Image (cartoon, grey):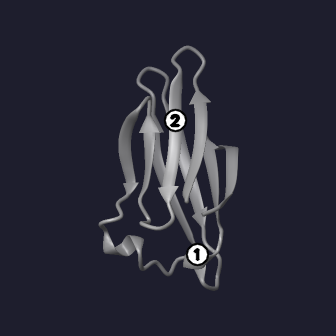
Amino acid sequence: YIMEIKLCLGENEKTDLVIKRNWITGGFYYLENGKKNVIKSSLNPSTHFNFQRKKTYEFVVGDREKKEIKIEHIRPLILAGFRSQSFIVYVNGEQHEQFKGY
């Protein structure tokens, strides 16, 4: 029930990035080298009542070797909470991973 995307980024400075979303609670977060950072809290009411089909989240990872991460979360038009959703991950503007599921 958890969407999970794992990435290893960087040339000189390695950054392990794990992006997770729990489709039941709506919690959406990432782990940067094991440290948890919340993207969207399951305690925020807007997590559960969202009428936009596409939402974009952006953040930066890495200390010396920065990587700009952008996640596009695309929901289906009808019964979005009960159907698979798409997640596209960009690193420094280039598409890196794609996931379709819950």
The residue pinned by badge 1 equals: 53
Q: Please give the name of the residue rendered at 61% of the width and 72% of the height, measured from the top-left corner.
A: 75
Residue neighbourhood size for the residue with mark 1, other residues' Cα within 10 Å, grouped as few (<14), some (14–19), many (≥20)? few
Question: Is 35 on the left or on the right of 96, as rendered?
Answer: left
In this picture, is 3 found above or below 52?
A: above
In this picture, is 80 found above or below 11?
A: below
Name the image quarter holding residue 96.
top right
In this picture, is 37 found above or below 27?
A: above
Task: Check disc 2 and give the amino acid type.
Answer: Leu
Question: Is 85 on the left or on the right of 33, as rendered?
Answer: right
Which percent across, then down, holds residue 34?
Answer: 41, 32
The residue pinned by badge 2 equals: 17
Nearer the camera: disc 2 or disc 1: 2
In this view, the residue in front, 40 or 57, is 40
Name the image quarter holding residue 7.
top right
Residue farthest to the top, as pictured: 12
In this view, the residue in front, 11 or 78, is 78
Q: Please give the name of the residue rendered at 52% of the width and 40% of the height, measured from the top-left corner.
A: 18
Name the image quarter holding residue 95.
top right
Which percent across, then down, holds residue 89?
Answer: 62, 48
Q: Which secondary structure lies at badge 2?
A: strand
Residue farthest to the front, as pictured: 1
Q: In what quadrant of the picture does the C terminus appear?
A: bottom right
Task: Check disc 1 and give the amino acid type.
Answer: Arg
Which percent across, then down, holds residue 68?
Answer: 52, 39
